[in-house]
Amino acid sequence: MPGEVSHKEAGRVARAHRPDHWNVDALPWDSLELERIADNEVFFFLISTASFVEITTDLYTSNLTAHYAGDDEVTVWLHEHWQPEELQHGAALKRYVKTVWPSFDWDLAYQNFYQEYGRLCNAAQLEATRSQEMVARCIVETGTASYYTMVRDASPEPLLQKIAHHIRTDEVGHYKYFFRYFRKYARQESVSRRAIFKALWTRIREIDNEDGLIAYKHAFQVRHPDQAFDPQRYEQFRLNLNRMTRDHFPFEMAVRMCLRPMDLPHPVERLSIPILVAGARRFL
Ligand SMILES: [Fe+2]
Ligand SMILES: [Fe+2]
Protein backbone atom coordinates (compact mmCIF):
# COMPACT_ATOMS: atom_id res chain seq x y z
CA MET A 1 0.00 0.00 0.00
CA PRO A 2 1.43 3.45 -0.86
CA GLY A 3 1.14 4.72 2.72
CA GLU A 4 3.65 2.10 3.72
CA VAL A 5 6.44 3.87 1.82
CA SER A 6 8.97 4.73 4.46
CA HIS A 7 10.21 8.26 4.79
CA LYS A 8 13.71 6.83 4.39
CA GLU A 9 12.81 5.44 0.98
CA ALA A 10 11.02 8.61 -0.15
CA GLY A 11 13.94 10.67 1.12
CA ARG A 12 16.50 8.42 -0.57
CA VAL A 13 14.83 8.80 -3.95
CA ALA A 14 14.32 12.54 -3.54
CA ARG A 15 17.95 13.06 -2.44
CA ALA A 16 19.33 10.97 -5.28
CA HIS A 17 18.00 13.55 -7.70
CA ARG A 18 18.37 16.69 -5.63
CA PRO A 19 21.22 16.23 -3.15
CA ASP A 20 20.70 19.74 -1.76
CA HIS A 21 17.02 19.04 -1.09
CA TRP A 22 15.62 18.87 2.44
CA ASN A 23 14.81 15.50 3.94
CA VAL A 24 12.74 14.12 6.78
CA ASP A 25 15.60 12.79 8.94
CA ALA A 26 17.52 16.06 8.74
CA LEU A 27 14.61 18.09 10.12
CA PRO A 28 15.25 19.32 13.70
CA TRP A 29 12.79 16.94 15.40
CA ASP A 30 14.33 17.75 18.79
CA SER A 31 13.16 21.32 18.47
CA LEU A 32 9.47 20.33 18.40
CA GLU A 33 7.52 22.40 20.93
CA LEU A 34 4.78 19.91 21.69
CA GLU A 35 2.82 22.03 24.14
CA ARG A 36 2.21 24.66 21.47
CA ILE A 37 0.17 22.34 19.26
CA ALA A 38 -0.80 19.05 20.94
CA ASP A 39 -4.21 20.41 22.03
CA ASN A 40 -4.93 22.07 18.73
CA GLU A 41 -7.69 20.03 17.08
CA VAL A 42 -7.81 22.17 13.93
CA PHE A 43 -4.11 21.59 13.22
CA PHE A 44 -4.49 17.89 13.97
CA PHE A 45 -7.02 17.61 11.13
CA LEU A 46 -5.17 19.98 8.79
CA ILE A 47 -1.97 17.96 9.03
CA SER A 48 -3.33 14.42 9.26
CA THR A 49 -5.63 14.85 6.24
CA ALA A 50 -2.83 16.45 4.20
CA SER A 51 -0.53 13.52 5.07
CA PHE A 52 -3.11 11.02 3.73
CA VAL A 53 -3.49 12.78 0.39
CA GLU A 54 0.24 13.45 -0.13
CA ILE A 55 1.26 9.89 0.61
CA THR A 56 -1.24 8.55 -1.91
CA THR A 57 0.44 10.35 -4.81
CA ASP A 58 1.53 7.06 -6.42
CA LEU A 59 -2.04 6.33 -7.41
CA TYR A 60 -2.15 9.47 -9.47
CA THR A 61 1.35 9.19 -10.92
CA SER A 62 0.57 6.10 -12.99
CA ASN A 63 -2.54 7.77 -14.46
CA LEU A 64 -0.53 10.86 -15.32
CA THR A 65 2.37 8.91 -16.78
CA ALA A 66 -0.03 7.04 -19.06
CA HIS A 67 -1.56 10.35 -20.17
CA TYR A 68 1.88 11.64 -21.24
CA ALA A 69 3.25 8.35 -22.60
CA GLY A 70 6.01 8.99 -25.13
CA ASP A 71 7.02 12.32 -23.63
CA ASP A 72 10.11 11.32 -21.67
CA GLU A 73 10.78 14.83 -20.44
CA VAL A 74 7.45 14.85 -18.59
CA THR A 75 7.27 11.21 -17.48
CA VAL A 76 10.86 11.13 -16.18
CA TRP A 77 10.27 14.35 -14.23
CA LEU A 78 7.03 12.94 -12.80
CA HIS A 79 8.71 9.75 -11.63
CA GLU A 80 12.07 11.07 -10.52
CA HIS A 81 11.20 14.45 -9.04
CA TRP A 82 7.51 15.13 -8.57
CA GLN A 83 6.45 11.79 -7.08
CA PRO A 84 9.37 11.39 -4.60
CA GLU A 85 8.86 14.96 -3.42
CA GLU A 86 5.12 14.49 -2.90
CA LEU A 87 5.76 11.23 -1.03
CA GLN A 88 8.32 13.00 1.11
CA HIS A 89 5.70 15.63 1.99
CA GLY A 90 3.43 12.81 3.11
CA ALA A 91 6.23 11.12 5.06
CA ALA A 92 7.20 14.33 6.90
CA LEU A 93 3.59 15.09 7.83
CA LYS A 94 2.95 11.49 8.87
CA ARG A 95 5.95 11.57 11.20
CA TYR A 96 4.82 14.91 12.58
CA VAL A 97 1.32 13.55 13.33
CA LYS A 98 2.71 10.37 14.91
CA THR A 99 5.08 12.40 17.09
CA VAL A 100 2.61 15.07 18.24
CA TRP A 101 -0.50 12.87 18.55
CA PRO A 102 0.93 9.40 19.43
CA SER A 103 -2.42 7.98 20.55
CA PHE A 104 -3.84 8.49 17.05
CA ASP A 105 -3.53 5.28 15.03
CA TRP A 106 -2.34 6.89 11.79
CA ASP A 107 -1.90 3.56 10.00
CA LEU A 108 -5.45 2.42 10.68
CA ALA A 109 -6.96 5.77 9.65
CA TYR A 110 -4.85 5.80 6.48
CA GLN A 111 -5.84 2.25 5.60
CA ASN A 112 -9.52 3.19 5.87
CA PHE A 113 -8.95 6.36 3.87
CA TYR A 114 -7.05 4.50 1.16
CA GLN A 115 -9.79 1.93 0.67
CA GLU A 116 -12.35 4.63 -0.08
CA TYR A 117 -10.17 7.22 -1.81
CA GLY A 118 -8.31 4.70 -3.98
CA ARG A 119 -11.51 3.82 -5.78
CA LEU A 120 -12.03 7.43 -6.83
CA CYS A 121 -8.54 7.93 -8.25
CA ASN A 122 -8.81 6.71 -11.80
CA ALA A 123 -7.85 7.82 -15.28
CA ALA A 124 -11.38 9.09 -15.95
CA GLN A 125 -10.54 12.06 -13.72
CA LEU A 126 -7.96 13.34 -16.18
CA GLU A 127 -8.69 16.14 -18.64
CA ALA A 128 -9.23 15.21 -22.30
CA THR A 129 -6.11 16.86 -23.73
CA ARG A 130 -2.55 17.06 -22.48
CA SER A 131 -2.54 20.85 -22.28
CA GLN A 132 -5.80 20.91 -20.32
CA GLU A 133 -4.47 18.34 -17.88
CA MET A 134 -1.40 20.54 -17.36
CA VAL A 135 -3.74 23.43 -16.52
CA ALA A 136 -5.51 21.17 -14.01
CA ARG A 137 -2.12 20.27 -12.50
CA CYS A 138 -1.23 23.97 -12.21
CA ILE A 139 -4.44 24.56 -10.25
CA VAL A 140 -3.78 21.62 -7.93
CA GLU A 141 -0.25 22.91 -7.22
CA THR A 142 -1.66 26.40 -6.68
CA GLY A 143 -4.00 24.87 -4.10
CA THR A 144 -1.24 23.02 -2.27
CA ALA A 145 1.25 25.93 -2.42
CA SER A 146 -1.44 28.19 -0.93
CA TYR A 147 -2.47 25.62 1.69
CA TYR A 148 1.06 25.18 3.03
CA THR A 149 1.68 28.92 2.93
CA MET A 150 -1.35 29.29 5.20
CA VAL A 151 -0.21 26.42 7.46
CA ARG A 152 3.29 27.94 7.71
CA ASP A 153 2.03 31.40 8.55
CA ALA A 154 -0.67 30.24 10.97
CA SER A 155 1.20 27.45 12.74
CA PRO A 156 1.72 28.02 16.45
CA GLU A 157 4.61 25.51 16.41
CA PRO A 158 8.05 26.33 14.89
CA LEU A 159 8.93 22.87 13.50
CA LEU A 160 5.64 22.72 11.64
CA GLN A 161 6.35 26.19 10.25
CA LYS A 162 9.65 24.86 8.93
CA ILE A 163 8.13 21.71 7.40
CA ALA A 164 5.30 23.70 5.79
CA HIS A 165 7.85 26.14 4.37
CA HIS A 166 9.84 23.32 2.73
CA ILE A 167 6.69 21.75 1.30
CA ARG A 168 5.36 25.07 0.07
CA THR A 169 8.63 25.74 -1.75
CA ASP A 170 8.40 22.33 -3.45
CA GLU A 171 4.78 22.94 -4.48
CA VAL A 172 5.66 26.27 -6.09
CA GLY A 173 8.46 24.44 -7.92
CA HIS A 174 5.97 21.81 -9.15
CA TYR A 175 3.71 24.57 -10.43
CA LYS A 176 6.57 26.03 -12.44
CA TYR A 177 7.30 22.70 -14.13
CA PHE A 178 3.64 22.00 -14.89
CA PHE A 179 3.25 25.51 -16.24
CA ARG A 180 6.26 25.07 -18.51
CA TYR A 181 4.83 21.78 -19.82
CA PHE A 182 1.44 23.43 -20.25
CA ARG A 183 3.04 26.06 -22.55
CA LYS A 184 4.69 23.33 -24.57
CA TYR A 185 1.42 21.45 -25.11
CA ALA A 186 -0.66 24.59 -25.63
CA ARG A 187 1.59 25.42 -28.59
CA GLN A 188 1.34 21.89 -30.01
CA GLU A 189 -2.42 21.56 -29.54
CA SER A 190 -3.25 25.22 -30.30
CA VAL A 191 -5.71 25.16 -27.47
CA SER A 192 -8.26 27.96 -27.15
CA ARG A 193 -8.49 30.28 -24.15
CA ARG A 194 -12.01 28.97 -23.64
CA ALA A 195 -10.75 25.37 -23.33
CA ILE A 196 -8.06 26.50 -20.88
CA PHE A 197 -10.66 28.34 -18.84
CA LYS A 198 -12.89 25.26 -18.80
CA ALA A 199 -10.12 23.04 -17.38
CA LEU A 200 -9.16 25.76 -14.94
CA TRP A 201 -12.69 26.29 -13.70
CA THR A 202 -13.42 22.55 -13.40
CA ARG A 203 -10.43 22.17 -11.11
CA ILE A 204 -11.21 25.25 -9.05
CA ARG A 205 -14.73 23.93 -8.42
CA GLU A 206 -13.24 20.64 -7.29
CA ILE A 207 -11.33 22.41 -4.51
CA ASP A 208 -14.53 21.97 -2.56
CA ASN A 209 -14.88 18.31 -3.54
CA GLU A 210 -15.10 15.12 -1.55
CA ASP A 211 -11.36 14.39 -1.09
CA GLY A 212 -11.27 16.64 1.95
CA LEU A 213 -14.42 15.14 3.37
CA ILE A 214 -13.16 11.56 2.94
CA ALA A 215 -9.81 12.34 4.57
CA TYR A 216 -11.48 14.21 7.43
CA LYS A 217 -14.02 11.44 8.01
CA HIS A 218 -11.37 8.73 8.40
CA ALA A 219 -9.15 10.88 10.61
CA PHE A 220 -12.18 11.73 12.75
CA GLN A 221 -13.43 8.16 13.11
CA VAL A 222 -10.08 6.95 14.42
CA ARG A 223 -9.48 10.01 16.57
CA HIS A 224 -12.97 9.84 18.13
CA PRO A 225 -14.16 6.22 17.89
CA ASP A 226 -16.83 6.89 20.51
CA GLN A 227 -18.54 9.61 18.43
CA ALA A 228 -20.69 9.13 15.35
CA PHE A 229 -19.48 10.91 12.22
CA ASP A 230 -21.80 12.98 10.14
CA PRO A 231 -20.88 15.46 7.38
CA GLN A 232 -22.01 18.34 9.59
CA ARG A 233 -18.83 17.82 11.57
CA TYR A 234 -16.77 18.50 8.48
CA GLU A 235 -18.81 21.64 7.78
CA GLN A 236 -18.13 22.76 11.33
CA PHE A 237 -14.41 22.12 10.87
CA ARG A 238 -14.44 24.28 7.74
CA LEU A 239 -16.26 27.02 9.60
CA ASN A 240 -13.63 26.84 12.33
CA LEU A 241 -11.02 27.36 9.63
CA ASN A 242 -12.61 30.57 8.37
CA ARG A 243 -10.61 32.88 10.56
CA MET A 244 -7.32 31.23 9.69
CA THR A 245 -8.19 31.37 6.00
CA ARG A 246 -9.12 35.03 6.21
CA ASP A 247 -5.93 35.97 8.05
CA HIS A 248 -3.39 33.69 6.39
CA PHE A 249 -4.54 32.33 3.02
CA PRO A 250 -2.41 33.93 0.26
CA PHE A 251 -5.35 35.01 -1.93
CA GLU A 252 -3.40 37.22 -4.29
CA MET A 253 -0.69 34.63 -4.91
CA ALA A 254 -3.37 31.99 -5.61
CA VAL A 255 -5.25 34.22 -8.04
CA ARG A 256 -2.08 35.16 -9.93
CA MET A 257 -1.05 31.51 -10.23
CA CYS A 258 -4.53 30.46 -11.45
CA LEU A 259 -4.68 33.24 -14.03
CA ARG A 260 -1.26 32.64 -15.54
CA PRO A 261 -2.23 29.88 -18.01
CA MET A 262 -4.91 32.19 -19.45
CA ASP A 263 -2.15 34.48 -20.74
CA LEU A 264 -4.45 37.49 -20.50
CA PRO A 265 -3.36 40.86 -21.90
CA HIS A 266 -1.52 42.69 -19.13
CA PRO A 267 -4.11 45.47 -18.54
CA VAL A 268 -6.94 42.90 -18.31
CA GLU A 269 -4.95 40.83 -15.86
CA ARG A 270 -4.13 43.88 -13.76
CA LEU A 271 -7.80 44.86 -13.57
CA SER A 272 -8.99 41.30 -12.90
CA ILE A 273 -6.71 40.50 -9.98
CA PRO A 274 -8.33 42.68 -7.26
CA ILE A 275 -11.83 41.62 -8.36
CA LEU A 276 -10.92 37.95 -8.30
CA VAL A 277 -9.10 38.27 -4.97
CA ALA A 278 -12.27 39.77 -3.46
CA GLY A 279 -14.34 36.96 -5.05
CA ALA A 280 -11.96 34.28 -3.79
CA ARG A 281 -12.18 35.67 -0.25
CA ARG A 282 -15.93 35.24 -0.38
CA PHE A 283 -15.72 31.82 -2.05
CA LEU A 284 -13.38 30.41 0.59
FE1 LIG B 1 2.81 17.93 -1.89
FE1 LIG C 1 3.03 19.29 -5.60
Image (cartoon, rainbow, N blue to C red):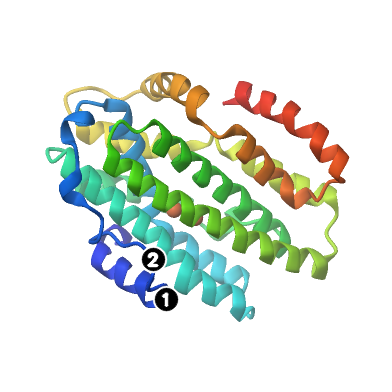
Q: What amino acid is labelled 1 in the image?
A: His
Write the residue at 28% across / 64% down: 5
Q: Quadrant of residue 153?
A: top left
Which of discs 2 and 1 lies nearer the camera? The answer is: 2
Write the residue at 32% across / 61% down: 2
Question: What residue would you read off at disc 2?
Answer: 21
Question: What residue would you read off at disc 1?
Answer: 17
Write the residue at 56% across / 74% down: 75
Write the residue at 81% across / 70% down: 188
- Whether 221 is drawn above or below 102: the answer is above
In the image, taking residue 282 as reference, residue 272 lies left or right, namely right
- The spot of residue 60 in percent (x, y) is 48, 60
- Whether 248 is drawn above or below 189: the answer is above
Which SS class for mark 1?
Answer: helix
On-image quarter of the C terminus: top right
Which SS class for mark 2?
Answer: loop
* Marks 2 & 1, CB-CB < 8 Å contact: yes
Q: Is residue 81 visible?
A: yes
In the image, taking residue 85 as reference, residue 264 lies left or right, namely right
Q: Quadrant of residue 69?
A: bottom right
